[in-house]
Amino acid sequence: MLYLNMNIRFNYLYRDGGNYKQFGHVVFSNTMQKPLSAIDEIITSNLIDGLWFYADKWQLKDLHNFLWDNDFDHNWHEYESIEECEENVTNGDIQAFLQSISGE
């Protein structure tokens, strides 16, 4: 039996006060073969009000890519989902990412 170690795609977005959205994702390797449910639990437990995070603090690309408007813009990004994928890794290993966001 051939075992394929799937990578983890982390999907997130930036939504301004006018509800304009910019979507993005990064792909992590999963060398420890951590289950999606365990990864999601760690991520959601480190979100602000169960939904938001600061992209710079999580060392992810800031998706706000248009002129700043103080009436509509903020620094929070939204966590959307994670999924297994076969895409190429763009951001290292998921275990290191989880440790960095949880302060371990």
Image: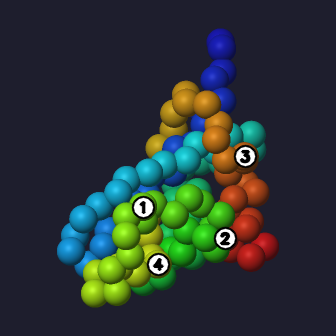
Name the residue tied to disc 3. 92
Q: Secondary structure at mark 3?
A: loop
Q: Is residue 59 visible?
A: yes
In this rendering, which labeled residue sits more in front, label 4 or label 1?
1
C-alpha gap between disc 4 and disc 3: 24 Å
Image vertical order of residue 67 relative to residue 32, above or below: below
Name the residue tied to disc 2. 101
C-alpha gap between disc 1 and disc 3: 24 Å
Q: Earlier in the sequence, mark 2 or mark 3?
A: 3
Name the residue type under label 4.
Asn
* Residue at image location 35% in from the left, 57% down from the top: 22
Q: Secondary structure at mark 1?
A: loop
The circle drawn on residue 79 is none
Give how far across and how far down residue 96 sits, in percent.
75, 57
Q: Secondary structure at mark 4?
A: loop
Q: Earlier in the sequence, mark 1 or mark 3?
A: 1
Q: Earlier in the sequence, mark 4 or mark 3?
A: 4
Image vertical order of residue 57 relative to residue 89, above or below: below
Name the residue type under label 1.
Asn
In this rendering, which labeled residue sits more in front, label 1 or label 3?
1
Name the residue tied to disc 4. 75
Give the camera-side residue of 77 and 93.
Answer: 77
